[in-house]
Image: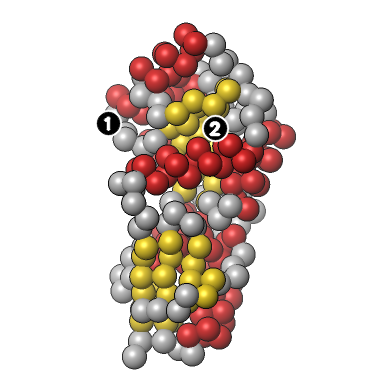
Amino acid sequence: MRILLVEDHQELSHWVARALRDARLTVETAGNGADADALLLTQEYGLVILDLSLPKMDGLEVLKRMRARGSKCPVLILTARGGLQDKVQGLNLGADDYLAKPFELAELEARVKALLRRSQGNEAVVLQCGQLSFDTVLRQFFYDGTALSLTPREYAVLEVLISRPGQAVPKEKLFDQVFALDDDANVDAIEIYIHRLRKKLDAVSQGHVAIVTLRGIGYLLEARP
């Protein structure tokens, strides 16, 4: 589940994205409203964190276009425009929550997780593949009850795979979900993280949960006897 952070202040965007990634969330960023609108036309996100005072296209216009297209993606408005009129307008246009700057990162993280829980039906959803499980509320992987230690990229790859257990995920789709706007990466970088994940899964599962390569098709996660 990816989050789109739309914020034109580069330093703030960096620190917010870093905090959310530390909380095991996958974050992409956009620095202006036009880029955000273009991404929302072609990509799926679990949540949008949206500033209002953006270059090229105002945040409220981005929100208005989202809802006009029928998008139900939760939106958290994050802005210095914290007046009552701005809040009312944003909520009337379809925002789900509103947090004024300055703010505490702990509060932002709590609001983000609350919106994600709400979008999943207010209940914890646990994805399972054999003894490997992923708690979508805690944002944590477990094998037979023991938490796994994964890097953010490994975590993102495994989240995509466990959401489709037994189904092949094309390498290109996996790359888009994990790397997205990282211009320095190429699609073959996925193989590095697949290799690392295989070693970690084999160490804890003794081969009972494995990532299978289907040449010319992609990768799938499967449980084995």
Residue in front for this viewpoint, 203 or 66: 203
Q: Residues within 10 Å of mark 1 (few under 14, many from 20)?
A: few
* Residue identifier under label 2: 6
Which residue type carries mark 2? Val
Residue 128, by quadrant, is bottom left
Secondary element at tag 1: loop
Which residue type carries mark 1? Gly
Q: Marks 2 and 1, how far apart in space?
A: 20 Å
Which residue is drawn at the image coordinates 49% and 57% (left, top)?
A: 139
Q: Residues within 10 Å of mark 2 (few under 14, many from 20)?
A: many
Can residue 212 be seen in the rendering of this structure? Answer: no
Q: Is residue 2 above or below residue 59?
A: below
213 left or right, relative to 192: left
Q: Is residue 96 above or below residue 193?
A: above
Dot placed on the residue nearer the N-terminal end, 2 or 1: 2
* Residue identifier under label 1: 70
Q: Residue furthest left?
A: 70
